[in-house]
């Protein structure tokens, strides 16, 4: 079955004006590529984007629809990994990106906060450490004890963290709007254009924006960005609104959100078949789908009809930071990929970071996201 999100009606992209040979070509028409194309075209750069299938047909149209600030690790971990200054800047970058996204996304983004839940004492301690670090650095966050949780969650979870600035996306609609804005700003967007080799491109500068769909264009990143499968299912409309904002638990292994029309979008459970989920094959599996169904029954106390099931691929890096910047040893080739399952906001942010750097405005955060950084020991 196809992604529920991708069933949204597609508005044809505006045709770009003829403007001669591109100065920059982008490979990948997800959130990263479209964000980069919009920023470049808005800066007056001639840009052409190649998407092998259709805009948003990769992870950007197949994900859980969580628009979360920050990186794939907790904020307290990022402070240890990056130092306080860069960690704060990384989080602030994504908060600014969320604000900018809400101006482009229209009804594809609802800023309703997110709720991270703890299932045991260890996860409660982790949430507490993240909460304290966020508060110390001036970020908005709210702690919930078990007794503060909604009735549907009480007894199952021990604590919660509300991130008020986060949101819920209809991710395919959002990225199509982004592509529309890029095309309206002058970007040429070529769907059905699979790039088999970088030698086939005309521009002097190329941006690889394929996240987990690494496929030989830059072989060193096929190794350092590990293709990772995530699976999702969607129910029929539920009779009431049980979950007013996106929820996630068990270190992100479980996540669910209810759409404005009352369906439950629920995914994760990769740990039911962890070794098999390190793959670029976009296929659902019995073992993971059964585990998601079991979580669904636990959360609702019933088994609503399931209308959609799908899989998508994201790219995981060893240190959970994306690679953003010029590819070492490859003149003119840039990359923005490897968000480790956390790319809805980061992808938007990193596409812009690359565009800014290509137009002479390099952000210092690129120091810590440098594709040439050593592998963690
Ligand atoms: C099941 C699942 C759940 C997720 N949930 C969340 C979530 O809730 N919140 C969150 O922040 N993140 C989530 N993610 C991660 C997030 O979806 C991705 O990190 C993000 O969408 C990456 O966007 P992108 O544009 O970099 O890559 P993609 O959206 O994957 O786009 C890459 C595109 O490149 C194209 N392509 C590949 N090779 C070529 C080629 N040779 N030539 C031309 N085109 C090519 C592909 O067709 C694809 O469309 C999830 C991912 C999955 C799979």
Image (spheres, helix red, strand yellow):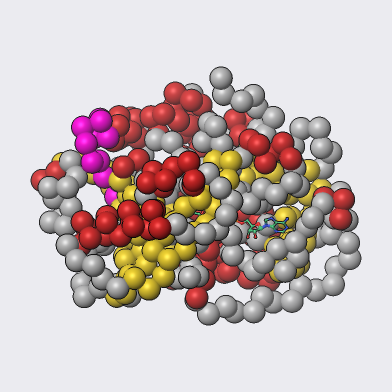
Q: Quadrant of the C terminus?
A: top right
Residue 117 forms part of the magenta stretch: yes
Q: Where on the picture, by quarter, is residue 78?
A: top left
Looking at this view, name the residue that lies furthest to the top.
377
- Ligand 1, by image quadrant, is bottom right
Could you tell me which residue is drawn at 81 percent across and 32 percent down?
Answer: 329
Residue 67: x and y in percent read 43, 54
**Residue 167 shows up from this direction:** no
Could you tell me which residue is drawn at 53 percent across and 63 percent down?
Answer: 61
Q: Does 137 sit above or below residue 173?
A: above
344 lies left or right of 244: right
Residue 206: x and y in percent read 78, 49
Residue 33 forms part of the magenta stretch: no
Residue 178: x and y in percent read 59, 65
- Toward the viewer: 48 or 84? 48
Numbered disc total: 0
- Toward the viewer: 113 or 251? 251
Could you tell me which residue is drawn at 64 percent across and 79 percent down?
Answer: 12
Q: Magenta residues, as a range?
A: 113-125
**Residue 214 shows up from this direction:** yes
Q: Where on the picture, by quarter, is residue 332?
A: top right
- Toward the viewer: 374 or 22? 374
Could you tell me which residue is drawn at 65 percent across and 61 percent down?
Answer: 29
Looking at this view, name the residue that lies furthest to the front.
286
């Amino acid at each position: 079955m196809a992604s529920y999100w991708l069933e949204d009606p597609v508005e044809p992209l505006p045709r770009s004006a003829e403007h001669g040979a591109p100065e920059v070509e982008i490979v990948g028409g997800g959130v990263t590529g479209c964000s980069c194309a919009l920023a470049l075209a808005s800066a007056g750069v001639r840009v052409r984007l190649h998407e092998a299938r259709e805009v948003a047909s990769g992870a950007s149209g197949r994900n859980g629809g969580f628009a979360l600030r920050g990186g794939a690790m907790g904020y307290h971990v990022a402070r240890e990994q990056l130092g306080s200054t860069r960690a704060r800047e990384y989080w602030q970058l994504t908060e600014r990106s969320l604000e900018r996204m809400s101006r482009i996304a229209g009804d594809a983004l609802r800023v309703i906060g997110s709720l991270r839940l703890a299932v045991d004492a260890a996860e409660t301690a982790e949430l507490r450490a993240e909460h304290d670090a966020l508060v110390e650095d001036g970020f908005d966050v709210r702690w919930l004890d078990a007794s503060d949780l909604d009735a549907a969650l009480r007894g199952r979870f021990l604590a919660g963290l509300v991130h008020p600035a986060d949101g819920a996306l209809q991710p395919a609609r959002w990225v199509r709007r982004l592509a529309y804005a890029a095309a309206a700003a002058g970007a040429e967007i070529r769907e059905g254009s699979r790039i088999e080799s970088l030698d086939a491109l005309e521009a002097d500068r190329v941006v690889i924006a394929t996240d987990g769909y690494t496929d030989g264009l830059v072989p060193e990143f096929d190794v350092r960005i590990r293709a990772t499968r995530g699976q999702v299912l969607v129910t029929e409309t539920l009779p009431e609104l049980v979950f007013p904002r996106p929820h996630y638990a068990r270190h992100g292994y479980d996540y669910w959100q209810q759409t404005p029309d009352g369906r439950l979008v629920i995914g994760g459970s990769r740990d039911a078949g962890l070794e098999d989920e390190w793959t670029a094959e976009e296929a659902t599996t019995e073992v993971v789908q059964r585990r998601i169904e079991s979580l669904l029954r636990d959360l609702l106390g019933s088994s609503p009809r399931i209308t959609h099931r799908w899989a998508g691929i994201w790219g995981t890096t060893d240190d959970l930071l994306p690679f953003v910047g010029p590819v070492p040893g490859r003149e003119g080739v840039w990359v923005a990929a490897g968000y480790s399952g956390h790319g809805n906001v980061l992808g938007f942010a990193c596409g812009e970071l690359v565009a800014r750097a290509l137009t002479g405005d390099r952000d210092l955060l690129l120091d810590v996201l440098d594709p040439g950084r050593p592998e963690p020991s």
